[in-house]
């Protein structure tokens, strides 16, 4: 026996309501203790972009001196070329210059998508993007992922293991020689 027109309309409305509820539940799954968790991409399928707190008015260019500057950036800073990894390609590649900061203004306000350098041993710093920020019984942690690697890093990175936050990437020609300078 066939459905009446009214029954079909009611069923169609119910399907739309259920689809909306599924979207709401998917968003709830992404929200954990007030933190967005993006493992393998966000709701759009993409990882959020880095968003350090540099205001547009803090970026200045002196035409006479031909100098580009960013004000209100405190030391310590580390300006270095990336040497031994393609895990963050194409955003950060071997030879690119990265400006990193240890300013608490950045370290204390990390967001999903920010690029950090973390280390468990000084001989093995890792530069990856934050894909998850959360809390557990031991406190704050984040998880990271190289943009060019299919799987996230398995480690929970604790606050004290986050050593630097990337403020700027300068895309340089391939084969750039090692450059590393600390300020502050």
Image (spheres, rainbow, N blue to C red):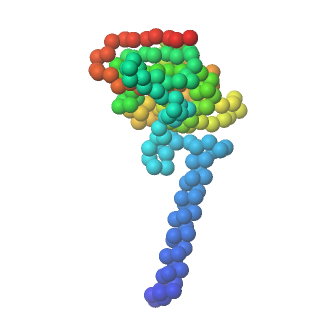
Q: Position of residue 172 (x, y in %)?
A: 33, 22
Answer left or right for 158 relative to 149.
Answer: right
Q: Is residue 174 above or below residue 49?
A: above
Answer left or right for 69 relative to 157.
Answer: left
Q: Position of residue 143 (x, y in %)?
A: 55, 32
Is 86 in front, or is 95?
A: 95
* Residue at point 46%, 22% (across, down): 69
Is 53 in front, or is 132?
A: 53
Q: Position of residue 82 (x, y in %)?
A: 39, 19
Residue 109, visible in the rendered structure: yes
Is 184 in front, or is 166?
A: 184
**Residue, far front:** 64
**Residue, far left:** 174
Q: Quadrant of residue 175?
A: top left
* Residue at point 61%, 47% (across, down): 31
Q: Quadrant of the C terminus?
A: top right
**Residue, far right:** 137
Answer left or right for 141 relative to 92.
Answer: right
Q: Is residue 168 above or below residue 9?
A: above
Answer left or right for 84 relative to 75.
Answer: left
State the count of labels: 0
Q: Position of residue 17 (x, y in %)?
A: 55, 69
* Residue at point 67%, 43% (across, down): 33
Residue 120, visible in the rendered structure: no
* Residue at point 59%, 50% (across, down): 29
């Amino acid at each position: 026996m066939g459905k009446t027109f009214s029954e079909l309309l009611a069923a169609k409305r119910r399907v739309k309501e259920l689809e909306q509820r599924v979207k709401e539940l998917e968003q709830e799954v992404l929200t954990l203790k007030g933190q967005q968790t993006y493992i393998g991409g966000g709701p759009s399928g993409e990882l959020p972009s880095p968003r350090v707190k540099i205001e547009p008015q803090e970026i200045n260019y002196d035409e006479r001196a031909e100098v580009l500057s960013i004000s209100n950036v405190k030391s310590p800073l580390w300006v270095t070329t990336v040497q031994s990894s393609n895990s963050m390609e194409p955003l950060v590649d071997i030879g690119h210059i990265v400006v990193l900061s240890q300013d608490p203004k950045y370290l204390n306000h990390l967001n999903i998508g920010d690029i950090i350098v973390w280390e468990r041993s000084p001989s093995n710093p890792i530069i990856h993007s934050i894909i998850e920020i959360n809390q557990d019984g031991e406190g704050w942690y984040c998880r990271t992922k190289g943009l060019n690697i299919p799987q996230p890093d398995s480690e929970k990175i604790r606050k004290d293991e986050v050593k630097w936050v990337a403020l700027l990437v300068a895309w340089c020609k391939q084969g750039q020689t090692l450059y590393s300078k600390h300020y502050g």
